[in-house]
Amino acid sequence: METQELLDRIAINVVQGRVEAEDEGFDEGFENQPAVIELVEEALENGISPSDILIKGLTSSMTVVGEKFETGEYLIPDMLASAEAVGAGMDILTPHLLKAGIESKGKFVIATVSGDLHDIGKNIVAIMLKGAGYEVVDLGVDVPASRIIETVKKHNAPYLGLSALLTTTMRNMDEVIDGLKEAGLRNQTKVCIGGAPTSQDFADQIGADKHCNDAFAVLDWLKAAA
């Protein structure tokens, strides 16, 4: 299979949300055909560079997924399936990218704040950040402010993402921002927040740098902040 055809097939299977050959995909005719895992491995065996597989096969296809989500053609579970396909490809690619000496764009700590157990949006952001070349430290859900601050300090992380899906728990983001200030870390760490009840007004109110509606907004923010 030609290089471009192989990269195109990886991209198509990301859009279809197919991780492995037995996955059906959103459209008909994909079941039992090679999916992201098989195609990424084939691309590596064929000598295609890990960076080309990453950029031209995996992450570029998420732009299509984002457009489908914005128009309502895809719902959150559909976008998550595509993000998981990217994540599966990234798991295979990461050691090859490191071996090739491709540098990380920086460490990004991400967490759902204390009292909140929602993680779908956070997981999509984490996968997309990995695909974009960031070293992600995902602390999971219901994370106390003290642990978030300790992790930012430990990794000297220039970026922090905070997520919450409840109006009652989004207030805990304020505690994290205050803790960063007290630890002397706020000036060296850019903070974005996200989640259904949050807004740019709320970000301004608590002193965060940016409110992002979704993973694509986070990537746009990072490009602007670089």
Image (cartoon, rainbow, N blue to C red):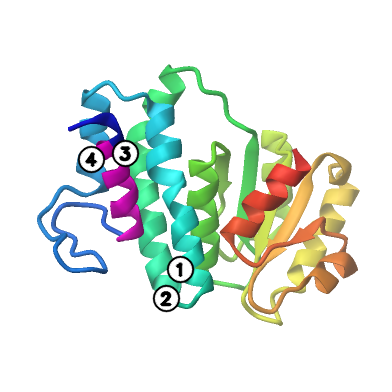
C-alpha separation, residue under disc 1 versus residue under disc 2: 5 Å
Are the residues tagged 4 and 3 within 8 Å (C-beta)? Answer: no
Callout 1: SS: helix
Q: Where, quadrant-wise, is the N terminus in this rendering? A: top left
Q: Position of residue 39 (x, y in %)?
A: 23, 40
The residue mark sitting in front, 1 or 4, is 1
Callout 3: SS: helix
Residue 97 falls left or right of residue 175: left
Disc number for residue 39: 4
C-alpha separation, residue under disc 1 versus residue under disc 4: 23 Å
Disc number for residue 6: none
Are the residues tagged 1 and 2 within 8 Å (C-beta)? Answer: yes
Residue positioned 30% across, 35% down in the render: 4
Which residue, given by chain and number where applicable, does mark 2 sit on? 73
Stretch of the chain drawn in magenta: 5-16
Disc number for residue 68: 1
Callout 2: SS: loop
N-term-proximal mark, 1 vs 4: 4
